[in-house]
Every structure is written in structure tokens, then in C-alpha cells.
Amino acid sequence: KAGVTQTPRYLIKTRGQQVTLSCSPISGHRSVSWYQQTPGQGLQFLFEYFSETQRNKGNFPGRFSGRQFSNSRSEMNVSTLELGDSALYLCASSIQGADGEQYFGPGTRLTVT
Amino acid sequence: GENVEQHPSTLSVQEGDSAVIKCTYSDSASNYFPWYKQELGKRPQLIIDIRSNVGEKKDQRIAVTLNKTAKHFSLHITETQPEDSAVYFCAASLTGGGNKLTFGTGTQLKVEL
């Protein structure tokens, strides 16, 4: 089975712009979670989608949003980018609805200048 | 919300020695505790996990123990090898919290020859 994939792998944006990141889960996995990884804050939960519904949301501003499609692929969007949004954005998929083993994608490295 | 503390932040051991990483969680409703290994530039990789109805789990050189009363869990790596060098993250998931993981701050393990 193919693993979790994310596109693009690298992205450079300017402050004030918006960005959309994509995540394709492992086939059959209906849960997709997004995390932000930075050297200062570590791994922080952004949100989780299950069967096209957002089930959980972390403590991030409304500029961070996401969605999930019927094929379980997920996208996250960040609007009005700030320098502090520079990070590695990781998605993880799980076959279980809760407390499931989560498998991470390679991440999208976002740099905001 | 849930808080996970992880110690130590760095750990250096000689090849063949054992390594122990400890985590403490705050919410007694947490019931799922995975451990991830992240090599430089790579995605976090699930290496072992434990659920609240189990006290210990072992997989070859890796073991995890859980003490629900004290709200802490530990990762044990025996007969360490240079390829064990990486950052290790513990995480916790709350009952009813879907697949939302709260991560510890990570431990940089260095196995020296």
C-alpha cells in the first residue's frame, strides 16, 4: 500500500499571501489529521477530519482552515500568511475513528518571507 | 486540555547500552500513548504504542511501560545501535478525542560508537 503523500513538498510564500497544502491518506483511511512542526513549539495539532467532517480543532487562529473530500484526501489552507507560519506541516492518516495508529506523510516545508 | 511533558531533552548513550525516555501526561482520561521516531529530514515514524488497559508492551529491542496511577509512560530501548539515533516523541490521546494527539517536546537520542 502506498503511504501518506503530501504536495507540494516545499513552498516559499510572501507575507499576506495564502497557501493550500494537500494530503492523500493511505487507501482506506478515513481520518486525516494535520500538525504543525516548528523548532520552538514542537508538534502541534491543527485539526482532524473524518468522513469529510472536522472533528477536532487545535488552538490556531481562524486563518488556518481545512477540508476533506469524499475520497478522504484533505487540504489545509492558511490565509494572510505571517512570518511565524513558517513550519513543516505534517498530515497523518488513520484507519480508525479514534485512538488509531496514525501514519505521517513527509510534510510540506512552508517558508514565509 | 491535555499536556504532555517529556524528559530528557537530550540523551547520549554508548552503543549497546540501554536508553530510557519518560513522559508524563496531565489528563487521566488519556487512553492511547504512541511513540514516534523522527530522523533528520524525515517524517515521524510510529515505533510502538500502548493503550490504557495494558501495562507493558514489547517489540524486539523496544518496550513501553504505562503507569496510569502516576500518569506516566516510558520508552525503553535496549542494545542501542547507531541507527537508533534520532528524535523520539511521545504523545497522548484523550478518550473521545478522536485521533487528536498531544505531543511531548521530543528527546534527541545520540548513540555513540
Image (cartoon, coloured by chain):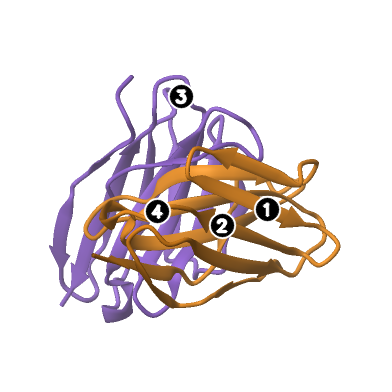
**Amino acid on which disc 4 is placed:** Lys
Q: Quadrant of the N terminus of chain A?
A: top left
Q: Return the residue nearer the eye: A88 or B72.
A: B72
Q: How far separated are the C-alphas under marks 2 and 4?
A: 11 Å
In the picture shown, does residue A77 fall above or below A31? Answer: below
Of label 2 and label 4, which has the lower sequence position?
4
In the picture shown, does residue A43 fall above or below A52? Answer: below
* Residue in view at x 25 percent, y 52 percent: B42
Which mark identifies residue B37?
4
Position of residue A79 measured from the top left corner of the image (x, y, whole percent): 33, 64
Image mark 4: chain:
B
Label 3–label 2 contact, CB within 8 A: no
User: Chain B appears in which tint?
Assistant: orange
Image mark 1: chain:
B
**Amino acid on which disc 3 is placed:** Ser
User: Which residue corresponds to mark 3?
Assistant: A70
